[in-house]
Amino acid sequence: MTRTARHVVRRRRHTLYFLEWAAAQRPVHLDTEVDMTRIQAHRAAARAAGTRYSVVSYLLHATGRVLARYPAANAVMAPGWPARLRRPGIVRFGSVTAKLALDRHVDGERTVLSALVPGLEHADLAEIQARVDRYRGEAAAELPEFKGVRLLSRLPVPLGRAAFAAALRDPRRRPTVFGTVSVSSLGHGAVDGFHSAGGTAVTLCAGRILDRAVVRDGHVVPAPVMRLGLTFDHRVIDGATAADVLGELRHSMEDFDDGARETVPGPHLRRADRDQGTARGLEQRPA
């Protein structure tokens, strides 16, 4: 007879506390497809010059600039709502800080760590990549930034739950604890698209890049395409604002320019050509 064992999920306690807290959100999901031609060309040129850039760094780069133009989406519902006796309140932030979800092994157990990438509205791609690389190192779980996560795994559950809630009680401290926008990527696996609610007004989810058929100047041609999901908290913003943010993110990535346009090879696609749409169902090999 097979014995059933009860496994104590110490390393995932912070995730469970988060899910309990985030249950108050009212998530709505949108998605689009991003033509990654210019970004892939920029990555290839940088790699040839000895520099490696992650796809998620380009997404973070675009996120900072877009949310700086949409402060209503760089916000959070203030504590106490929807308690019946309190008026709803929304706190908007003057700077963009991403909460980047990372999958890491901690003491032999897979754990999601949330790394903060601040100042995205003005950080350049190299600065963003340096921060991402720091968090992706083998010893990332031991960084001082994750001291709180390590503490939550050791505290008794009632104390851990209370400590987690206390850390998020003051919305003015939220950027330094939880970020102002959530970003996650499963592009390294066989995942075309997905959605999650990261506890912020906007959560961005990037899938893998595949060659797909797109229409340019009336002709069907292959292009590297990434599906980008956006989940928004309907308590904080409405669908029209969320759609504008997603559209701006798409255009920002498709028109990527790091300030050195002459070093970026490959076609600079006209937006009118791209907006003719993507012909689905003609997938090619992975990018």
Image (cartoon, rainbow, N blue to C red):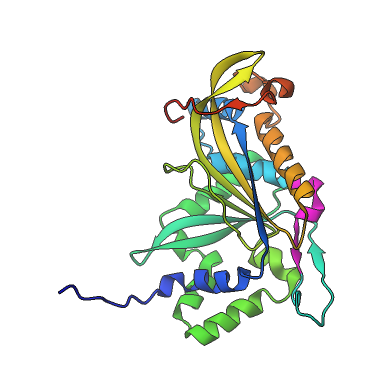
* Image position, residue 39 (x, y; %): 59, 30
Left or right: residue 48 compared with residue 94: left
* Image position, residue 162 (x, y; %): 59, 83
* Image position, residue 137 (x, y; %): 45, 53
Left or right: residue 5 compared with residue 113: left
Looking at this rendering, what residue extends furthest in the right direction?
A: 87
Left or right: residue 147 compared with residue 123: left
Left or right: residue 229 compared with residue 252: left
Residue 50 in view: no
Give 208 or 144, whichever is nearer the viewer.
208
Give 165 or 132, whichever is nearer the viewer.
165
Residue 255 in view: yes
Instruction: State which quarter of the image contains the N terminus.
Output: bottom left
Residue 168's place in the image compared with 216, above or below, is below
**Residue found 62% across the figure and 19% down from its top:** 215
Magenta residue span: 66-77
**Residue found 81% across the figure and 53% down from its top:** 71
* Image position, residue 84 (x, y; %): 79, 80
The quadrant in which residue 38 appears is top right
Give 243 or 114, whichever is nearer the viewer.
243
Q: Is residue 108 magenta?
A: no
Total label count?
0
The quadrant in which residue 57 appears is top right
Residue 117's place in the image compared with 214, above or below, is below
